[in-house]
Amino acid sequence: MKDLIKKPESLSKLEFWAATTIYVFSVFLLITPAVNNEHSVVFTPNKPLFDEANIYFNYYKNYFIPQLIQYTTFYLAFMALNFSIMPMFLSKKELAKNILFVVFVFLICSIILGTTDTYLKNYLFAQYETEQDTYVALFQQNFLYTFWLLLLFGFYTFIKYTGVYLLAHSEAIQSQYKIITQDALAAFVLWMVSMFLLMIGDAEVEFIITWGILIPLAILLYCYSIYSLIPSSLTAKKPFVSYVKKSIFALILSLIPVFLSALLLTKSLDGALIISLINIPFQLLITVPFSWYLFKRQMKGKEDVYVLQKELGQSNANFDFLRSQINPHFLFNALNTIYGTAIQEKAERTCEGIEKLGDMMRFMLQENMQEKISLSREVDYLNNYISLQKLRTDPNPIVKIDSRIEPQGNGVQIPPMLLIPFVENAFKHGISFREPSHIKISLEVREHTLYFDVNNSKHLKQENDPEKTKNGIGLSNVKQRLQLLYPAKHDLIIHETGKEFFVHLTMQLS
């Protein structure tokens, strides 16, 4: 799934081979029809209609060749629309030209289907008064059928791009809406795909409506269970029984809204009543226990991660040993020597850069290993890093850096290096010396709550940039640290557009 999200070409290959497989399989079934052993004649769905109309039936002329042409038309039309016309249409390139292409494909398909149906449904000529009436009926029917297929393809395109977007941005959506989980988003995408398949397969309308109502309700109940019902039931003597009782109460409350929704779609009192009554046992027997199982599985996974992290903590001694091999006195003496040389040469910017770098190295070697440090020291490190970056960006007028970090002197403490990954990411991806760039950073503390915002422009990496194919681990690591250090006490929202990247972090400080 991750490969399909990160590599659109993988999805295109999957679509190509899926469509090709369906086409080849359909042709294979056409070539090897079922044979009636008693009469040794080829059975086709339309032959009885020819016999009933007392019209001569030729297998190749009235079935095989027309069906083969129709299957090939469907296959080629899908390939043209899905891989050529629709991507350009969605990118708004040559819009008028692509609309004409869609109309052209629609007309060609309608004409081919109408022409082949004059052979497939030749028996209809005996049911109309004139041949002209038969041709009009056949071509009119196929124009409507082609239009229906075009609508289905539009629905499929909507499902595909919506699904890819939701799955690709699942973390950002979940960070903004806590009740929505990645599993729920994946289930929603699968539900849309299933609706498309049911519509293509000409399933019963009642079944489509029922499926279209029950599954979204199951997804909503799952989200609410994971977010509220199950966590609030864990303190009870019998957690599962308490969870089931709360689920029953929630389902009873939803009875009227479900009935009204079903009535709106079915326009039948009996149908709406049946769906609303089916919903309760369906959710109790399937969604409720399944949600409980997934929640317990997630909790078990988090426990395993905690144990692993605890075991990994024992490796800190090895890290400390390696760190001790670096002689900080040598490093600072070397920096002091370079700093003195820069002063003698009157290189003020170089002096400033060396001074900031020295402060950052002192922070890394001394305070970074502590469990917590004062927020003021973390702010000092942020300011030193930003100042060091400004030394290389200030000469360029198209790069704008706005830093509003309030001095902190209230004795608040936080884990070290918790905020810097967001700033590093902004400078890594937000600066380009070839086009306008901006970075805005703000930090303030109000009533024991920290508010931290980073906003930066986005630029495509150059082909020769060694960082082009690398995905940094800084943001993923800081997300994990926040989950471990500030569970239920922080809110991290990451939003990304085509040209900008936004980070908003709030933390309750204690």
Image (cartoon, helix red, strand yellow):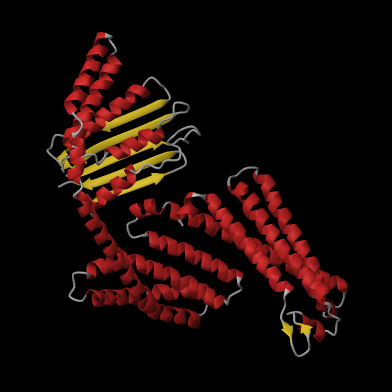
Q: Residue at x 21, y 69 (%)?
A: 234
Residue at left 32%, top 42%? 474
- Residue 367, position in %: x, y? 17, 36
In the picture shown, does residue 450 fall above or below 281?
above
Residue drawn at x 72%, y 63% as measured from the top left: 72
Q: Position of residue 335 (x, y in %)?
A: 23, 21
Q: Position of residue 448 (x, y in %)?
A: 17, 44
How many labels sit on residues? 0
Check the image and report above or below for 459 versus 69. Answer: above
Residue nearer the viewer, 19 or 309: 309
Q: Is residue 60 visible?
A: yes
Residue 155: image location, x then y, percent = 57, 61
Could you tell whether 139 is left or right of 294 in the image? right
Quadrant of res 42 = bottom right
Task: Classify 117 as above or below 481.
Answer: below
Would residue 406 be seen by someone viewing this image from the given angle? Answer: no
Q: Residue at x 75, y 70 (%)?
A: 67
112 horizontally vs 172: left or right: right
Splitting the image into 4 quarters, where does residue 68 fall? bottom right
Front-most of residues 228 and 303: 303
Residue 200's place in the image compared with 162, above or below, is below
Residue 221 is drawn in which quadrant? bottom left
Outermost residue toward the bottom in this view: 38
Considering every residue shown, the one lying at the far left of the view is: 411
